[in-house]
Image (tube, coloured by chain):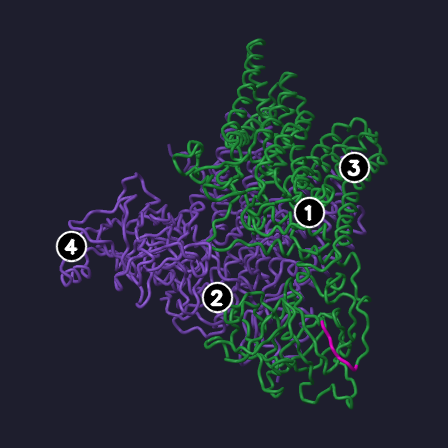
Chain colours: A green, B purple
Amino acid sequence: MVQGERCILGKQLPVHLSFLFFSWDETHFGKMGSYYINRTFFFDVHPPLGKMLIGLAGYLSGYNGTFPFQKPGDRYGHHNYIGMRGFCAFLGSCLVPFAYLIVLELSKSLSAALLAASILIFDTGCITLSQYILLDPILMFFLMGAVLSMVKYNSCAVRPFSAPWWFWLSLTGVNLAGAIGVKFVGLFVVLLVGLNTVYDLWELLGDLSLSLVTLGKHLLARVFCLILLPLVLYTAQFAVHFAVLNKSGPGDGFFSSAFQSRLIGNNLHNVSVPEHLAYGSVITMKNLRMAGGYLHSHWHLYPEGVGARQQQVTAYLHKDLNNLWVIKKHDSNTDHLDPSCSVEFVRHGDVIRLEHKETSRNLHSHQHEAPMTRKHFQVTGYGINGTGDANDFWRIEVVGRKSGKRIKVLRSQIRLTHLATGCILGSSGKTLPKWGWEQVEVTCTPYVKETPNALWNVEDHINPKLPNISLDVLKPSFPEILLESHMVMIRGNSGLKPKENEVTSKPWHWPINYQGLRFSGVNETDYRVYLLGNPVVWWLNLVTIGLYLLMATCTIVAIKRGAQLTVEFKELSEVLLHSGGKIMLGWLLHYLPFFMMGRVLYFHHYFPAMLFSSMLTGITWDTLLKFCAGCLSCSMGKRVYTYGMLALMLLIVYSFYLFHPLSYGMVGPMASDPNSPMAGLRWLESWEF
Amino acid sequence: MLGFLKQPVVVTAEINMNLVALTVMGLVNRLWALSYPRAVVFDEVYYGQFVSLYMKRIFFVDDSGPPFGHMLLAFGGYLGGFDGNFLWNRIGAEYSMNVPVWSLRLLPALTGALCVPLAYQILVELHFSHCAAFGAALLILFENSLITQSRLMLLESVLIFFILLAILSYLKFYNLQKCSPFTAGWWFWLLLTGVACSCAVGVKYMGLFTYMLLLAIAGGHSWHLIGDQTLSNVSVLCHLLARGLALVVVPVAMYLSFFYVHLTVLYRSGPHDQIMTSAFQASLEGGLARITQGQPLEVAYGSQITLRNVLGKPVPCWLHSHKNTYPIRQQLVVSNPPRPVRHGHIVQLVHGITTRYLNTHDVAAPLSPHSQEISCYIDYNISMPAQNLWRVEIVNRESDTDVWKTILSEVRFVHVNTSAVLKLSGASLPEWGYRQLEIIGEKLSKGHHQSMLWNVEEHRYGKSQEQKEREVELHSPTQADISKNLSFMARFTELQWKILTLKNEDTEHKYSSSPLDWITMDTNIAYWFHPISGAQIHLIGNILTWASANVATLVYVCLFLWYLLRRRRKICDIPEDAWRLWVSAGGLCVGGWAVNYLPFFMMEKTLFLYHYLPALTFQILLIPVVLQHLTDHLCRSQLPKNMFSALMVAWFSSIYLVYRTFSPLTYGEPTLSAAELRSLRWKDSWDILIRKH
């Protein structure tokens, strides 16, 4: 708990908000904690557990959720933020004992465990990351918890189905649910536990002394604790999430119309509209892609040189009068709202005309290229008071329905096919330039594909001649909203693409500690915190990975060639190959997948892998020194072992002494200035503290 | 002495008639009426332009893959005497008389035909019966999609050929390993494996998947070798070194040699020049080299230069100022005699035409509000003083006193007052900026990025102070020639890097499909359509073969898991030999299918049905493997065996029937009527073009 205390002491100083670049900052997660306290619905690309815990910590410590978290650097003032920070710092400091216990369990060597733990205590990066309101300490807590309980239940294997065995097995499941509940990166630790379990079962299967019934019990126990239990807990998190957040908020626009009808304060909540679409109805149409926007038009024309110079049609994310369209028959211009007319419903397969209510121009398309997506056709508003030409005719179809059926508000997924060219009305998702008021482009795509881009649903529906029904019957069930929120999260995640010409962090930067992240303060007079690993520790970790691979290869080849080992060396090689292998696998699983990710990456994504790497360092150096000691004479060997361990520890402590201002804050000139006290420590040009 | 003459010279030849027959059938079936249709079919329009460029020796960059495949196609054109004069712009365009269609399509067709005997031989080397091997070859022979793909000027059949060749030669090598290592035959097959692998990778990057699979299999076999304690340490080492040489060193060397030939053959500048750096362009004949020839190497105070951004994205661009046409020369302040600019020197940049200084100050840039605006300073009022001093930092310098060199040096301009760095932001300016790209001063230089680097492209230096004389001097080429010869490795790394990173804008295609559609062949591609007669060519497979292959894969995986679990409990259903055969053959076929198929789920590029063909080939090879296993081990008595054989005959005949039914769409003739076409639409998702009358 040493680290925890230090974290809490150090935190008294920076009372203004610290920040990372872009949106992954304390403003972000602090704000989400406030949303939970205020019960306002929001959208985030991560699952809810981490933010829920932050919100809970804030609630319990008396934070009332009123701090606006607007821009980094704002002072907290009288707001009680210590509870949230303290909670994260506490979880972050639990990592040290966890690492100690894991390494102790795996290698049965006290000094290896101490080495691994001291690396985590004295790493500036880990300290900085766990001092603020971020998801990472929570994620790493669950991750290490899962590994620890996995290791523990493995060592209980001699007494299966005993109470500790059940305890650790189910604890693994609980921690797994926690890890994925905080961030999807938790999936990697699920994979690690999964592989370990498969290996475990394979060993059991080969043990002919066990009957098939016992094997079945083993299998069922694991299925129950490691698959079903986490799934139930994970789903429960979402149930709580949806139950708590029942007020309309900034996240509404990301979700479908049906989803929005659940939220108090949303204009779709508890309203009643006519159920089936009829001619003469006034409607708004929402694109089905995430944050797709409403079909919109306004008096402005497309500028010169962009297709035909006709009225713009766009997709607009906000609700406004210009989103209203009137459904008309394609061949007549009668006013269907005239009381003498009978109600005629629109049916699947009908040819219709959509008239913009404000400007009374028809939705129109023709073979001019669209403004942004050159391969698609332009969509415009055309005609005066409803008289246009044959290019205004659209066939309305519902996905997965037979012709002749009526069209439902909200529920029906509608496709509008342009009659003359055969293209489909869709939103490309690209933002138009200034002339289009930075709204989203609407095109007519000649590629007939079932994508949400080309599907629409009717949201508002006004027709005085039809009876209104309550939308409550359309409320989605829990599995549906669970599925939808996952789709939205996945799309949101893959939408975080780096921009061209932007300097981004690359996975190969991370293990070499190439570049850190500025947490707080830019100028000389500011109080600055910089997220950067302790370079001595990180480079030691990096060297150790190479060393481990070399040692493991030598050992495994020697064994394969039939080398005769003494009992002592046999034990050492066992630790090196099995325990070290598990940790190495963990490192690989938490690091390599980032090379294949297309999204924006940040330095702090490496920290889970760094935990594994630190534990590997403990095990490897311990084994190496023991091996050297074993080769030398008894007293000499002991001395080599002790001095080696001491030297490593001292190195780590001294480097921490040098670099501790990085995490506890620096004031004064920048390190690039030769007068700064930190100037001598700027070992790489890319560090900017 | 002459004892050998006592014996007659006897040559005994052993000819496997199966192989001969299969080869002949393959040739007939792939080469029949090869030059029909005499029109550009589908992706021929894409590969054709590269063939033309090869014929004209014009340099190009193709981001779809390495150059070996294009080179092979171009070789066909060379043999046919093609002069490269054809405008490849439209699918369906008639070929003019100077295009040797037959010889252009010959190579893919030949390799496609040779896949048939290769399939036979692979199964024989896997120790399966000749009957099974013959079956595998027939399945490949009657696979419509493979036929279509190999009869046109496309690269998949070449790729599949090299993949199969690599597999076969590795199997041959492995079988020789047990009896006679380090003999001539052993070396031959081992080296051939490496060569075939590098050819496969050289044709398309997809070949990498099979190469990795072979490396993994070879790694597994080597691991057993290490465990073999009858071998001495030295001989184990020799074995490992030989494998390393043949499977790693040789392929890498071959791969480099493809690029060597590519760069030697293509020496003229062409349409893709601008993607490359100035140094690369200067090494090509014509183009930039014509301008830069004879210009002074060292940039001095007073030089007139154009500055090009090192990052060629989104488009190559030069530092530019308005009221004039491109390129505008930046001129350094004159001093006499010429004093070279070195790293760390402070310079001013003067716009050549408007004679204004390049300036930046703490005003937000138009599109990137976090960065500084860059402008040419105009002295409107006094309130904002000129801040036009820039420090030159040569990034790729060798020493701190390096001189700024034309073309070669990559330079960063750091503003003296604000320490902002001159950078290309990547955003394009609106209408008032003529949609040119925005230049900014980036204040907090976060690391290095190519968009901050600039190099001098054109360079003139005039000594005279007199305006008129200077102008004459500036326009006549000057003294020293720069060393423009880049080494091969430098050119290779640049080209390779460009091929890997060049991204086409997201192309949506009517016939693109997702990998999930491929297994069940829910999609097809219309390759060609005759505008008058309505004859058409489609990439459409033999649906029966595809379905059988899927069933075989499923059966294999289930049986494999069943055996595996049972063996772990020490229950052996099949003899040890049969099990080993089952694992090795399955590992190869299912493994080959998986490595050639699954990676596509992670790719973001536009995918087509033809990407599945290599995976399909492996899957087809699995069918006879599974069938033979079923007859050998699951049909114990005679009666089911006979019934099984009868079923086999029926099944093979129906495969042949399906092949015949779809062959009009494969070969493009005979022309079918609308009703016949409609009857061929066995799946609703197939897009067969039916004319409306």
Of the residues tagged 4 and 1, which is closer to the observer?
1
> In the figure, B347 relative to B177: above or below?
below
What residue sits right under mark 2 in the picture?
B44
| Both labels 4 and 1 in a single chain | no
Could you tell me which secondary element the residue under label 4 belongs to?
loop
What residue sits right under mark 3 in the picture?
A170
* Subunit that carries the residue with mark 4: B
* Mark 4: few/some/many CA within 10 Å (<14, 14-19, 20+): some
Q: CA distance from mark 4 to mark 1?
A: 69 Å
Q: CA distance from mark 3 to mark 2?
A: 60 Å
Instruction: Based on the picture, tell me whether residue B398 belongs to the magenta stretch.
Output: no
| Both labels 3 and 4 in a single chain | no
Position of residue A201 measured from the top left corner of the image (x, y, whole percent): 75, 35
- Given residues B464 and B549, the one toward you in this image is B464
Could you tell me which secondary element the residue under label 3 belongs to?
helix
Of the residues tagged 2 and 4, which is closer to the observer?
4
Q: Which residues are magenta?
A: A460-465
Q: Amino acid at mark 4?
A: Lys
What residue sits right under mark 1 in the picture?
A51
Of the residues tagged 1 and 3, which is closer to the observer?
1
What residue sits right under mark 4 in the picture?
B463
On the question of residue A187 being in view, the answer is: yes
